[in-house]
Image: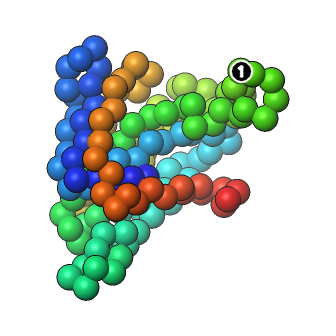
Amino acid sequence: MQRVSRSEVRVEGNPIAQTELGLLVLVGVADGDTEDDARTLADKIVHLRIFEDDDRKMNWSLRDVTGTLALVSQFTLLGDCRKGRRPSFGAAADPREAVRLFDQVAETATALGVPVVRGQFAAKMSVELVNEGPVTLLLDTRKEF
């Protein structure tokens, strides 16, 4: 999750998702993730207080600043590089399950009142962003880090 002043996602050079102030979240779905994980993740993204208030303290959430959420699927987040010279993606969910849970994150965030734009699942995308702060946070519903 990155706090951004703007972001853009392109497929084959064509913009498919753009934001101004908001969050760009790269979402990796692991084997064994559930709808509860997707809903928990969306709730955390929408309500996490990572935007600065008037006193420059992180007290405002995405909803408080009326920001936009950009979601981009990225199975490579599940890459395991501990052995050999090529990442293993065995921990990534099956693509059919991954797209279903990715969609659940988007639907939950929308229901919580924030505008959501998305990258294209399983497409080769170019992602451009301006990270403000910079602020980048890792979220894991399994609490492994």
Report if residue 110 is visible in the image.
Answer: no
Residue visible at 34% across and 26% down in the picture: 126
Query: What is the secondary structure assignment of the residue under circle 1?
Result: loop
- Residue 3 occupies which quadrant of the picture? bottom left
Q: Which residue is rendered at x = 28% and y = 64% of the image? A: 62
Could you say where residue 142 lies in the image, as x and y percent from the top left?
Answer: 66, 56
Depth check, front residue: 129 or 122:
129
Q: Nearer the viewer, residue 35 or 26?
A: 26
Label 1: few (<14), some (14–19) or many (≥20) C-alpha neighbours in 10 Å: few
In this picture, residue 84 sits left or right of residue 135: right
Q: How many marks?
A: 1
Position above or below: 32 against 45: above
Q: Residue furthest bottom?
A: 55
Q: x and y percent of residue 111 in the render? A: 29, 57
Q: Is residue 27 left or right of residue 80?
A: left
| Residue situated in front as seen by the camera: 96 or 85 | 85
Q: Is residue 14 left or right of residue 129?
A: left
Name the residue carrying label 1: 86
Q: Is residue 57 visible?
A: yes
